[in-house]
């Protein structure tokens, strides 16, 4: 299948072959019939991409600040690698489409294969021949509604949410500033709601178009004094009951005008991307209410709603993202709105690049621009193959496949597979697999992990998906006879760990991405204290908050203790050189949060040889403080690692070793992994991998119990299979 992509570095657009996306139980696979270009949003994206690096920096100073902070915390080279990965990774466009369901997941009620649906969501309802959409973002069409009309639902829901936020009611006069696609959708909705409309825009063509299709409205060119005077006349000097801003501009003029034309205690609803420099005096005197409308409505940006498919009860949240889409479709079906009047151009998907010339060059007037897909074209789940590879493999090197090739894998794993023979790469959406194939030289890209597991030439598989998939994919890969590198954590549950142990058997090969033990700074410190007897060990990690991040989702990420704390449990296990016997944890617990979701925790470990260690992991610290500091004490010797940048060694005197850059061990670990494939000796003994994973589970258990947990107990759970 093909998908439309943008290059963030150059602004170039392209149609790219990609594997079909993989079905998940809470979503549907949809064959697009039409998709709508959101001209304002997508034009601004493409125009931003086409700016120079200096132009991008001037336009987004917030991102520049993030980059500078990353340089301070992670070093120049790591930051450069991250920025380059972001800029050179093609990104899909589009977020509103309609099509026919090819497959429906197990927990998608009310939708089945063959149904027509409207779809929304950036990263889901893309301009692509086939898409995957979570169930709350796919809405069945009312009977006999044209899919061409239904493709407007994702954008229409934005307009509908803006109207709801304005509080506009029957008989009220509402001003709409900005008469692009969303502005004209807003006018149609207000007309259907029985409101009087005053539309305002700087483009005479927009005024002419909207006046033809929205009878009885008053439409004015953006002239401040004339607009104020006309609305005053229309309302008996009262002012508009509400103003909805649908313009997209860096200027604060729309907000300033809204303050002038809206009546006392009226509402201003900001829908468009507009400068919100509020004229306080004007808003204060009239006691105006300003609301910023959140895209399609409640549920937007909530992964529980959008990704997991858990809906909000209608009794408490009447109009969600999905229900706003459904309302738009029903209004269109009943003839109360006319989205067809807003479609100015339709292009075949094969000619999609021409449609973007229309919206970026701005020579002709346009409004809604549709892409139409070939309904006769056949699609199959065959991998996308590539004839050339940018790197030549070392003779006799193992053949490696990869699953999940997002930002982390692209920055810290795949670049270090030097000399490896790269076979297949798979990702759930397929696109990132294609990007990785082109960048690193994999032979084929797939949307299904089985296509990598079933490849007879593949010797080893790298798994770097989201955490909830690690356990099953590791088990499946081992059962397929593949050696496995899985990014931490190994898995999220005892049951998954038992499956891995059984699949590993006696001849398995498994490594987990505990890269800290392979860092140069750790090697120096370990050599200094090794053999000195029981040690006192401390790891302090100032990780920063990840509130709302998928890693904090107990289902997907497993939380920071299991998802990231395992790194430092493994590190203390290495430095102690002895099995863990007891785990005791305490945490700051936010109200309504489980032990798994804690971001601030102290984990104390006792080891068989008498060593003790503590992990202080916090998300509450200042970003100005370096991320990691380790301290080690044993038999009159001490070692201190300061954020992997320097090592202080104490034994009578003090020796300071400063390191080049901030190396946390990714390159060293991948080198050891490849070496181990040749010798058959994994970098970390399998029992230690299991032990560290059990200890991370014990840390969560200890917080929940408010009591220490013995490793004997955890091993017994593993043996019992609970």
Image: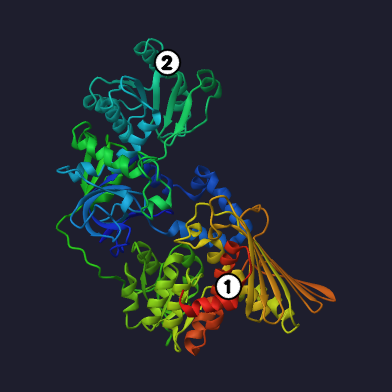
| Residue at 39%, 20% in the rendered image | 241
Is 212 situated above or below 695? above
Disc 2 crowd rating (10 Å Cα; few below 14, some 14-19, many 20+) is few
Image quadrant in which you'd find residue 217: top left
Q: Is residue 561 left or right of residue 110?
A: right
Q: Position of residue 714 (x, y in %)?
A: 55, 75
Determine if residue 693 is in view.
yes
The residue at which mark 1 appears reads as 695
Determine if residue 519 is in view.
no
The residue at which mark 2 appears reads as 225
Q: Position of residue 184 (x, y in %)?
A: 29, 31
Is 381 situated above or below 579? above
Q: Earlier in the sequence, mark 1 or mark 2?
A: 2
Q: Is residue 315 left or right of residue 689?
A: left
Between residues 694 and 95, which one lies in front from this camera angle? 694
Q: Position of residue 215 (x, y in %)?
A: 22, 22
Is 265 situated above or below 623? above
Image quadrant in which you'd find residue 696: bottom right
Helix, strand or loop at mark 2: helix
Between residues 631 and 310, which one lies in front from this camera angle? 310
Disc 1 crowd rating (10 Å Cα; few below 14, some 14-19, many 20+) is many
């Amino acid at each position: 299948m093909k998908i439309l992509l943008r290059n963030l570095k150059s602004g170039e657009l392209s149609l790219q072959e990609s594997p079909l996306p993989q079905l998940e139980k809470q979503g549907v696979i949809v064959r697009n019939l039409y998709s709508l270009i959101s001209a304002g949003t997508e034009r601004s994206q493409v125009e931003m991409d086409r700016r120079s690096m200096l132009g991008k920096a001037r336009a987004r100073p917030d991102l520049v600040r993030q980059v500078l902070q990353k340089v301070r915390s992670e070093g120049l080279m790591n930051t450069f690698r991250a920025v380059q990965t972001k800029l050179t990774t093609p990104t899909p466009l589009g977020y509103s489409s309609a099509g026919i369901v090819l497959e429906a997941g197990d927990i998608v009620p009310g939708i089945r294969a063959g149904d027509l649906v409207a779809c929304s969501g950036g990263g889901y309802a893309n301009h692509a021949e086939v898409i995957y959409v979570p169930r709350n973002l796919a809405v069945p069409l009312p009977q006999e509604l044209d899919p061409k009309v239904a493709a407007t639902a994702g954008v229409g829901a934005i307009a509908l949410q803006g109207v709801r936020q304005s509080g506009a009611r029957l008989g009220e006069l509402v001003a709409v500033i900005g008469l692009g696609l969303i502005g004209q959708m807003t006018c149609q909705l207000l007309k259907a709601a029985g409101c009087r409309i005053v539309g305002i825009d700087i483009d005479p063509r927009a005024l002419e178009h909207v006046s033809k299709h929205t009878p009885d409205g008053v439409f004015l060119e953006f002239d401040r004094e004339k607009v104020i005077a006309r609305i005053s006349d229309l309302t008996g000097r009262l002012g508009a009951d509400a103003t909805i801003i649908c313009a997209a501009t860096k200027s604060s003029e729309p907000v300033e005008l809204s303050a002038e034309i809206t009546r006392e205690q009226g509402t201003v609803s900001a829908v468009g991307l507009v400068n919100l420099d509020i004229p306080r005096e004007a808003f204060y005197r009239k006691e105006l209410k300003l609301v910023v409308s959140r895209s399609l409505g409640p549920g937007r940006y909530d992964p529980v709603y959008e990704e997991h498919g858990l809906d909000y009860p209608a009794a408490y949240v009447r109009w969600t993202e999905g229900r706003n889409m459904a309302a738009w479709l029903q209004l269109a079906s009943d003839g109360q709105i006319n989205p067809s009047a807003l479609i100015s151009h339709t292009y075949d998907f094969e000619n999609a690049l021409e449609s973007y010339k229309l919206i970026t060059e701005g020579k002709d007037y346009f409004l809604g621009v549709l892409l139409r897909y070939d309904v006769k074209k056949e699609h199959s789940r065959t991998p996308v193959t590539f004839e050339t590879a940018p790197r030549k493999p070392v003779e006799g090197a193992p053949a490696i496949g990869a699953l999940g090739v997002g930002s982390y894998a692209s920055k810290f794993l795949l670049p270090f597979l030097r000399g490896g023979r790269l076979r297949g790469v798979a990702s759930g959406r397929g696109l990132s697999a294609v990007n990785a194939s082109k960048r690193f030289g994999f032979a084929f890209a797939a949307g299904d992990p089985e296509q990598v597991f079933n490849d007879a030439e593949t010797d080893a598989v790298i798994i770097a998906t989201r955490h909830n998939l690690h356990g099953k994919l590791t088990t499946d890969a081992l059962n397929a006879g593949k050696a496995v590198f899985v990014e931490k954590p190994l898995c999220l549950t005892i049951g998954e760990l038992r499956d891995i142990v059984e699949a590993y058997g006696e001849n398995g090969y498994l490594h987990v991405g505990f890269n800290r033990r392979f860092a140069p700074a750790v090697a120096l410190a370990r050599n200094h204290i090794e053999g000195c007897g029981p040690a006192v060990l401390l790891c302090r990690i100032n990780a920063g908050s990840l509130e709302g991040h998928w890693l904090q989702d107990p289902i997907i990420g497993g939380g920071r203790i299991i998802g990231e704390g395992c790194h430092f449990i493994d590190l203390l296990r290495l430095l102690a050189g002895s099995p863990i016997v007891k785990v005791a944890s305490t945490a700051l617990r936010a109200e309504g949060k489980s032990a798994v979701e804690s971001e601030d925790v102290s984990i104390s470990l006792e080891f068989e040889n008498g060593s003790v260690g503590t992990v202080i992991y916090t998300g509450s610290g200042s970003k100005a403080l370096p991320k990691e500091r380790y301290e080690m004490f044993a038999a009159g010797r001490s070692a201190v690692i300061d954020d992997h940048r320097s090592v202080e060694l104490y034994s009578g005197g003090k020796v300071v070793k400063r390191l080049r850059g901030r190396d946390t061990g990714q390159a060293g670990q991948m080198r050891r992994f490849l070496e181990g494939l040749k010798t058959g000796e994994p970098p970390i003994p399998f029992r230690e991998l299991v032990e560290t994973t059990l200890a991370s589970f014990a840390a969560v258990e200890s917080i929940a119990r408010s009591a220490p947990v013995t490793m004997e107990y955890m091993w017994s759970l593993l043996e019992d299979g609970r």
